[in-house]
Image: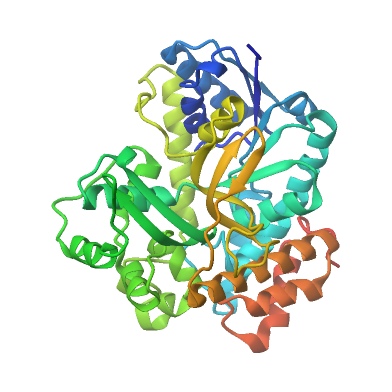
Amino acid sequence: MKNYKISFVGASYLFCHRVFKDLTKIEELRDATVVIHDLAEEPIRIVTGVCKIMNRIAGTNIKVVGTTSRKEALKDADFVMICINVGGAGADMEVQKVCRKYGVTYPAGDTIGPSAIVRSMRNIEALLSIAKDMERFCPDAWMINFTNPMSQLTLAVNKYSKIKCVGLCHEIGKVEDLAARMYKAEPKNVSIVAAGVNHFTWVLEVWANGQNKTKTFHDDFNKFVDKPRKGKRTSRDWVEQEKLSESWKLSRVLFDRYGLLPVGGDRHSSEFFPYYFGKRTGNGKLFGMKEIDFPARAKGRAESKARLESWIAGKEDPWDMDKPSGEEAHHIITSVIRNSCHVNPAVNILNNGCMSNIPDDHCVEVPAVVGQYGIKPLSLGKLPENIAALIGRMGSIYKYTVEAAVTGDKKLVMKALVLDPLLQEYENADKLLNDLISAQKKYLPKFK
């Protein structure tokens, strides 16, 4: 049996150990090598330490190693996971400060808006550099990207590299969980067909317990979310907590008005419709949302780090080892290894005919079949015209953003910016762009 090599680029305290937990359940990976790569020693030490403990608990023989050498991490790898953010939270906070100056606020900022455009340009250059090294050291490997902005980064690698690249996001799990609770079904007996772009896909079909619930889904959804919740539902797992804390208040409005339910939930959806995150809603308070809070996020990261360190110190064992993480990387890996033709409900790839009224070269999030032949999107036909118009606009923004990142052309950035729904003051667009580039100049050397 082949000894596979799986490398993580970026020792994330949130993602790496979650994905590793799933890998321990794959028979073909029992003797694999997992490499944790980062530029800093501390996250490598912590993440490799936790993965070794998980390996012991699972009874697998996975070799876990850490390295600051990208070459060592990539050489002969079969799968490469990307969990990076150039500049980190500090760079994101700089961008938020500039955006606020021009009346742009947001609850996430990592998908669309001026913040996401700049974040894209910071990370695209890094991702293309990684892809170039993969072409040298592991040309047949799959790149599995977790980094946001998902659509823009995945598009860049697919367009400017020979590397096979797919982007993965766990947001569809919220609707799968919702439908399971709504129809009193086991999660394995629920299927959701959704399509669009990352954090902005729309539910096209709902199946539960072998029955097609699509026609009644709107009414069923409204009745279900109308019911008062009994007590606060919590989980120690942050992805599970995202599902439990979703209120669906804004999503319900969008479902009524657009005819389909957005998968991304209230927080992400509001950024595509900033009217619902403006002053008239108390900057989202009407729908239970608030502006992104970087100090709170920093506290959350510190807590995640402390939790992992407590596992290493033996204060407690990693919990939920028997449950899947909600990430889909292991399904991609097993489908490629086994050629099992698994249908993944939400992958980020080029459209290539999946939706007939969306350009083929747009990066979309759709269900797809995965095997040794690659990843092939399902044929979904036409999206409803109102939804296609929204998705097409986003695809154009992403294309301009990628081209701008590669060329350093500010005119292309401006084309993306003035198409973006989060831009509030068109008369100050030039000043906003110049201030953003100035604030991020050490990360954007191509822009003068």
Residue visible at 78% across and 64% down? 403
Q: Quadrant of the C terminus?
A: bottom right
**Res 329 quadrant in image:** top right
Q: How is the image coloured?
A: rainbow
Q: Position of residue 330 (x, y in %)?
A: 52, 31
Counting from the top left corner in percent of width and height, residue 19 is at 51, 32
The N terminus: image quadrant: top right
The picture places residue 214, in percent across and down from the top left corner, at 32, 61
Image height check: is 180 above or below 213?
above
Closer to us: 200 or 309: 200
Q: Nearer the viewer, residue 221 or 381?
A: 381
Of 317 and 295, the residue lying toward us:
317
**Residue in the image at 55% along x and 42% along y:** 369
Query: In the displayed structure, does residue 431 sit left or right of residue 129?
Result: left
* Number of marks drawn: 0
In the image, 59 versus 297, the foreground residue is 59
Q: Is residue 117 visible?
A: yes
From this viewpoint, is residue 149 visible? no
Position of residue 448 in the picture relative to residue 117 (left or right): right
Give x and y (percent) for residue 316: 35, 20
Q: Which residue sits at x=38%, y=58%? A: 205
